[in-house]
Image (cartoon, rainbow, N blue to C red):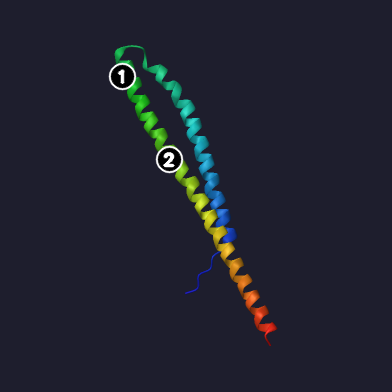
């Protein structure tokens, strides 16, 4: 089994995930702005007040869920980019170790 890891590709993928999270955050904000004014249409009577209260509770819950999903997505993008950086650092350290080992072996001859 041969495992190939492309740190640059992983970093691009992580950037893509982070970009998607940013667009999702912006969409949630636009959605929230458009929905917040809807409660005025419920009316000022008792039934309208109950509808407005229910609407507000459901909307706040949904908004929190969407924001948590966007945060999770942003975190995942960061994690993918961090994994890519860690892998690249490990590759560089291994390459340096081999260079040093080769220099030590060549110098010992």
Q: Between marks 1 and 2, how big is the CA–CA gap? A: 27 Å
Residue 55 drawn at (x, y percent) = 36, 25
Residue drawn at 52 percent across, 49 percent down: 17
- Residues at discs 1 and 2 in contact (Cβ within 8 Å): no
Q: Name the residue under label 2.
A: 68
Residue drawn at 50 percent across, 35 percent down: 27
Horizontally, residue 101 falls left or right of residue 2, namely: right
Horizontally, residue 31 falls left or right of residue 43, namely: right
59 over 109 or under it: above or below: above
Q: Which of 7 and 98 is in front in this view?
A: 98
Identify the image quadrant of residue 44. Answer: top left
Q: Could you classify mark 1 by the number of other residues whose Cα lies within 10 Å: few (under 14), some (14-19), or many (20 or more)?
A: some
Q: Name the residue under label 1.
A: 50
Residue 83 drawn at (x, y percent) = 52, 58
Identify the image quadrant of residue 38. Answer: top left
Q: Nearer the viewer, residue 45 or 74?
A: 74
Pick whichever of labels 1 and 2 is earlier in the sequence. 1
15 over 36 or under it: above or below: below
Disc sitting over residue 106 in the figure: none
Residue drawn at 53 percent across, 46 percent down: 18
Q: Which of 108 and 26 is in front in this view?
A: 108
Q: What element carries label 1?
A: helix
On the rendered image, what quadrant is the C terminus found in? bottom right
């Amino acid at each position: 089994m041969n495992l190939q890891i492309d740190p640059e590709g992983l970093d691009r993928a992580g950037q893509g995930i982070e970009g998607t999270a940013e667009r999702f955050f912006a969409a949630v904000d636009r959605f929230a702005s458009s929905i917040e004014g809807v409660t005025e249409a419920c009316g000022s009577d008792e039934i309208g007040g109950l509808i407005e209260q229910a609407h507000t509770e459901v909307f706040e819950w949904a908004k929190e869920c969407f924001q948590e999903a966007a945060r999770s997505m942003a975190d995942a993008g960061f994690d993918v980019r961090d994994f890519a950086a860690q892998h690249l650092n490990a590759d560089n350290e291994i390459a340096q170790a081999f260079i040093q080992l080769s220099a030590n072996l060549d110098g010992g001859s």
